[in-house]
Image: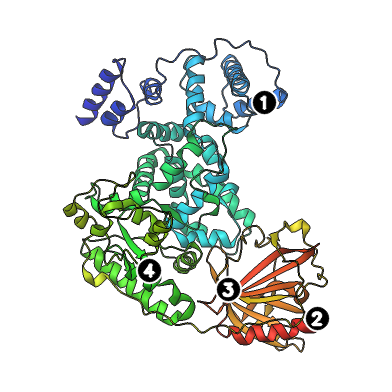
Amino acid sequence: MDDTIWLVELESALLENDCGQTDILNICKGREIPEQLRPEVWLCCLNIRNKEDSMKGFDEVFDLPYQRQLRSDIHSSVEKLGNDDDWELMAVMSDLESILTFYCKSKNVEYDSSWIDLLLPLLSLKLKRADTYNLFESIRDSYIPKNAKDAFPLLRLLLQYHDPELLSFLDSKRITPELYASLWFNTLFGGTCILPVVLSLWDVYFQHNDPFLIFFMSLIMLINGRDSIMSMQNDEKGNIVDYLKNMASALEQEDVQDFMQLAQYYSLKTPSTFKTETFQTFFGIKNPLQATNGEKLSLSEALCLPVSVNELVEVSSIERSHPDACKFFLVDCRSADEYNNGHLSNAFHLDYNLMLSDPMAFQTAVNGLLRSQKQAIELHASGEHLCFVSDDDAYVYMVIASFLQKNIKYISILSGGFETIHDYFGDHMLDCLEEHNLQKCSVCRKKRQNGDKLEKDSTAESSPKLTKSSSHDLFGKISSVMKTKSAEVKGKIFEYIVNPVQTPTTPLTDRHVYPNERNGKRYRNVPPVFSIDDTDDGDMSQVFQEEEEPFETVNLPNFLKDSSIIRSFNCQEVHMNGFMYDTVLAFTNSHIIILRELGQDKLAKVVAKRSLSSIVKITAKKRHQNLITFKYGVPEGENLIITDMDRFLIPNASEATKSISKLILKQL
């Protein structure tokens, strides 16, 4: 009876001129649309029901530079349809060529062969050419991500958020989303699924009017195939990529409802900040003259999904209507001093200093964090989604990476760090922040230096107007057992190593170079510089990239017994994204050899062999004397060109740097 009622309601709604996507969704509720009503429903959902004929001015001139290739692709695709009616095939090919030619000319874009797979399901509706073109144009403009450069990194981040172990497996095979998901995104699965499945998928997709749903459909495709993918450990990369590309072809029409419901479920369980931050990039009007430097979010460089302070506060302050929606467990990774000078009442304190100075204490704190999170979930005071907050991205990345390497799900980071929380509450910060010290809070000190007012009655233009009672309720659900303080770690000062050769009178300036500029030659008359400081080590993202070439694999104990190895030190290699790898540094008379432990059969891979003569700086942090950065470079006139960097966490850093400094001196 219910099925009959909703169909009657749908037919009645379609008779109204103002019927739109919201009306369709309220009636159909994500159901598959009957074939006879599908064309009108899609036109309504895409808001082009009354749109004029965009192609009425088409001159029917087919003279694109790639017209012959376009025509050939159309012929090949239509032949696969297996229709014996020659007149119908000719009509289909004619409409395809006209629509694609006009689209290329009117949009001033180059033809893409995937557009045929996007058009064929639309032609099956047997609409007028004008309506078919309008549907195609609307889908292309509203549902196909315009910036694949960031679209694929976003899919990777979503997979990491929900299944870090599966992502780790694909990363180990160097399989990135662009290798298998391009056709998924460019055709909304129209190029990989059979026609009945595509029509059913699009029925649901257009009803929900969520262009980001394609990301979660792709995510579900991967998660559903997880067991099969993980079982391909010994398969070649190409075989795995082919399997991933073809997974969608196994989807059957009766599976569509469950598949789309899962996609919506995972969307609900994911922080939504990325949608607001990237909508214009993916689905907005593309303006080639618009500068991209001001974009808020660069997903290709992100370690994990970002969460805005607005989303964090809203999720924490209201009762979510859906039990599966995101609920955050806040992890404050600032130093003990910063935490004690102001923090949110429900934030678990995990001092990043512990990770570098006392790994065992850090692991104990992590265990306490996970236990506290479990308690908070049981009390319905918090959720399973971990959101990390800090005032130093470089260090919080290391903390986050340690969680990701344990394949812990639901990891995110607060965009802008603690300062955004401070600014959000504005004149209510004294009510909303625990133990807030106006004199010692680093954010307050910074604002005083900038001349900003910090009085309680001052106004903050960007801050919401909160009452005192509501602000106390905002983050007050977690009991005091959630508040922990880390002991302040006292560091020893690293021995300052100075080369006795006199330094040149002209100061040296560092700059990075591209790989093709690196020649590895020893600079002349420029001494190596060893220092201990708290300055930035520079942007290593441009120069520190692992090549895809195969590494040499060695038996580690046997390798270290070689007579050429003078000293070796166990340590951890620290990537700029925060990931840490068990490593051995082996010194010879002429090189540093970096060996990454593989964790099996005492094997290690030789990550790099660095010439001692190329080392120009060894730096350490005053607060973390065991975090050592090696900089390599060559001279260019009076300037020093930094060509590469390595960073290590060395338990016996003082002894290691003394050893290597002696070896370097022998090279002079």
Q: Which residue is identified by label 1? A: 70
- Return the disc, 1 or 2, that comes first in the chain's sequence: 1
Q: In which quarter of the image is the N terminus?
A: top left
Amino acid found under the numbered disc labelled 3: Asp
Amino acid found under the numbered disc labelled 1: Leu
- The image position of residue 30, as x and y in percent, is 32, 35
Residue at x 43%, y 31% (from the top left corner): 199
What is the C-alpha distance between the residues marked 1 and 4? 62 Å
Q: Which residue is identified by label 3? A: 533
Q: Which residue is identified by label 2? A: 667
Q: Report whether 514 appears left or right of 414.
A: right
Q: Which residue is identified by label 4? A: 338
Q: Report whether 282 appears left or right of 90.
A: left
Residue 583 higher or lower than 310, as above or below = below
Residue 256 higher or lower than 123, as above or below = below
Residue at x 51%, y 25% (from the top left corner): 136
